[in-house]
Image: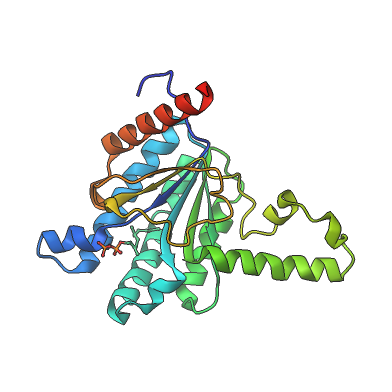
Amino acid sequence: MNNEINLPNHVGIIMDGNGRWAKKRGLKRSLGHKAGADNLEKLLKYIFNLGIKYVSVYAFSTENFNRDPEEVNYLMDLFVKYFTKKKKIFVKEGLKVIFSGSRNNLRDDVLKGIDSLEDATKDLKKGTFNICLNYGGRLEIVDAFKKLYKDIELGCFDIDHVTPEIVSHYMYQDLPDLDFVIRTSGEQRISNFMLWQSSYAEYYFPQVLFPDFDEKEFDKALEEYNKRHRRFGGV
Ligand code: FPP
């Protein structure tokens, strides 16, 4: 990448197309998720080394529980393995790993994996990797309102003084707004991904399926982001 590129501070990735990637190769869907997880590891290394500070990924939506139980179980096993095996790598890379989502309905070993990874990386500062797992954007806003309501009842502040900035602090994680959201596989939907944080984000929908969304594809995405920003700044 050339040095004059304008980097987004916070990138979101909707990792879509694992199933189709596997189907095209006559493989089971689960192997598409495995290929997606392998790709994510390489991609994250590349993105954080460029100097991007925040990356959020959509790993599992609340609606994904409606999939075939075999696929759901495979994904949960994959998460547990990934969180355990990659812990050392995240620590070595200096990346803080955080999670967004509901803890309801998640298996104990998944919750344990989440807690342990968050704890092991909580003081790291090179970048922040936010994993949306058992996540829904509307549910996040509803959960935020529930917490906010309790604080208002406790007298922490007056309802008339609630601002968008205050509401932001009640989201699952205190993150900056998303600058750039990429959804792979050609689907052009947000599907309930970080609705509050993406109010001003630029969107990009490459055709490529997530397991094939490599460093070169990310460079193309950044070029597109830069074109959009130049136009925006020029108006
Ligand atoms: C959507 O593709 C993808 C998912 C629901 C799972 C995403 C998970 C990974 C990439 C695994 C790695 C993640 C972590 C955090 C270890 P799809 O299955 O809906 O694909 P399709 O639309 O082609 O069927």
Determine whether, in the image, residue 146 is placed left or right of residue 67: right
Q: Position of residue 29 (x, y in %)?
A: 21, 67
Determine whether, in the image, residue 129 is placed left or right of residue 23: right
Return the residue found at the far left: 26
Return the residue found at the far front: 235
Q: How many marks?
A: 0
| Residue at the spot 34% in from the left edge and 69% down from the top edge | 75
| Residue at the spot 40% in from the left edge and 37% down from the top edge | 47
Q: Which colour scheme appears in the figure? A: rainbow
The answer to whether residue 6 is seen in the rendering is no
Where does the N terminus fall, quadrant-wise? top left
Q: Quadrant of residue 64?
A: bottom left
Determine whether, in the image, residue 229 is placed left or right of residue 169: left
The answer to whether residue 208 is seen in the rendering is yes
| Residue at the spot 17% in from the left edge and 69% down from the top edge | 28
Q: Position of residue 157 (x, y in %)?
A: 87, 60
Q: Quadrant of residue 167?
A: bottom right
Name the residue nearer the viewer: 10 or 201.
201
Q: Quadrant of residue 16?
A: bottom left
Q: Position of residue 38 (x, y in %)?
A: 28, 52
| Residue at the spot 13% in from the left edge and 65% down from the top edge | 27
Residue 17 against residue 232 in the figure, above or below: below
Residue 163 against residue 9 in the figure, above or below: below
Q: Quadrant of ligand 1?
A: bottom left
Name the residue nearer the viewer: 230 or 5.
230
Q: Position of residue 212 (x, y in %)?
A: 23, 47
Determine whether, in the image, residue 183 is placed left or right of residue 102: left
